[in-house]
Amino acid sequence: MPVYVQHEILAKVGDVFNAEALWQAPGLALFSRRPLLRDLLERSPREQRGRAATRCFSHVTLMLPQDEVDDDRHLTRGARVRDLAASLAALHQKDFGDLLKGDEVRYHVVGTDAVDAGEVKVKFGHAVYLPAPGEQLLYTVTASRDSAVWQPVCAVYPNQRLTLIGQDEAAATFAVPGWPFGDEGGILLVNDGPDAPVEVQVRPKDSLDCRFDEANGYYVIRGKQETGGQRLLLKISRVGAPAAADAPGAPPLRTPSVWKPRAAADNDMTAMPLAVPESAPVPAAAPLPPENDATYAPVARHRITLAALALPRLSRYRDTGAASLEIGLGAGLAPAAPGKDSVIRFLVDDADEVHAITSAGRQRVGVPARFAPLDGASVQLHAVPPQMADRYAALLAVPQGPVQPAAAGTRLVFGRGMPALAALRVLDAPRFLRHADGSAASSADRLGLSRNAFSWEATAEGLRVVRLSETQALFHLDAELRMVAQILDASQEQPYLVPPGHHLVAGHYVLRFDA
């Protein structure tokens, strides 16, 4: 395999800012002197014919002791660093001008703790590129172990053809945070210009397994040797593509909420958002089919499933002191209290920003988004229908949500004060909601869910819904979580019908009727 990145140490350097001392030693003792920068470039040409060099490398990075660079910045505002780069570029142009083939000579001087005093590390090669002043990025490369927290790896510029990434900078252009494969191999990015996609190759060829996950838009890399089943996800993003969180038409923040008083007999208050006038007419409730004399026996296939959790816009509840709502998903991707057993957690803060949290850290995420914290399992954040966007920041799909049997002919009440259906209300605990001072707040269900929100009755035609609270917001979504209607009129005499496979949203809960 060719050497894509040359790393060499120049030792016993008296003055690391002396360009002539780094470039070539005085005298003609060719066999006794230690190799310096000119010798290294001469011995490792970019192209050669036979033993004769026909082209040399022109981009070189020098890494000096960090203390020396810091002192220069403090005392001369970095003048010695700039002079060193300019002097070396001039020496390079003078001695190798006939081998440059029109390439511009560029030097970059940085500080690092990886070299000792009196040493200089030199880096050049096929996969070393220094951008021109003002050159714009073409791609950004990020890596993740869990698809939730992405760490920056490097940038790729339009004229940067080769980039090698791997365990550390001693054998690659850039180190990948969390690289799990040791020195088993590396990933070579081949950029043939803005009109061609980046080519991703494993180097050496058979050291790693690399496959592109088209559904999620990233590469999945696994080791072929024993690495404990480790994987690395690699995403190559074209600069300038709009992020989901910044997409046009994103809902504006609305006014915060207040605690709304209820009847004197009910001292357990519900936090309800201030009413927001609707700018568009609300679709009418779906008409009910005519009654007939048929009798429906209870069947086990009627059930209510918690299909998703509606993450609220906490800015609407700021007067309650709620600062964050955090939900964890365990190894089976069932919702649970946030803790060390969670493979991924989602948090919405009082600025209505959504964050993903894993063992790798915390990162703000856009909506919609898909995550794969485990092999063969994915979690999706859905965008909220526009009619609900003033109340909710995202819909978090629950792959393994609890299920409640719904026997036909039986009417049940859903709400904060009804223990019969408490298994569906997975956020009914103070550990999900936090105050601004960091203390645990009351049950998260107090944000937007009434004590008696609605009742339902399962039938073969669908779920017959009756509103029991005037302040409870209810929404009807179809099987794809698209808005059908906001449920305003649903009385005992004329209930609202939710067809099988559709969803009903109340508070944080997106419930699906399965028949």
Image: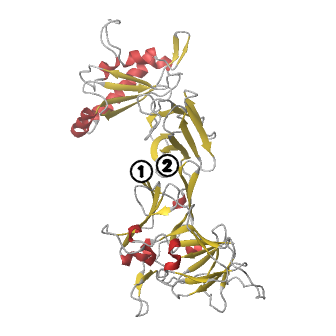
Q: Quadrant of the C terminus?
A: bottom right
Task: Locate residue 22, reporting x and y percent.
Answer: 32, 20
Residue 137 in view (yes/no): no
**Percent from the top left, x then y, of residue 356?**
46, 57
Rendered view: 275 above or below 326 = below
- Mark seen at residue 471: none
Disc 1 and disc 2: Cα gap in Å? 9 Å
Neighbours of disc 2 within 10 Å: few (<14), some (14-19), many (20+):
many
Q: Evaluate whether residue 360 shows in this view.
A: yes
Residue bearing mark 2: 146
Q: Amino acid at mark 2?
A: Asp
SS state under label 1: loop
According to the picture, the residue beneath numbered tag 1 turns out to be 359
Residue pictured at 50% horizontal, 54% vertical = 331
Q: Nearer the viewer, residue 268 or 122?
A: 268
Q: How would you rate the neighbour count of disc 1 (Cα within 10 Å): few for under 14, some for 14-19, many for 20 or more?
A: some
Give the amino acid at mark 1. Ser
Q: Quadrant of residue 454?
A: bottom right
- Mark 1 or mark 2: name the one nearer the start of the chain: 2
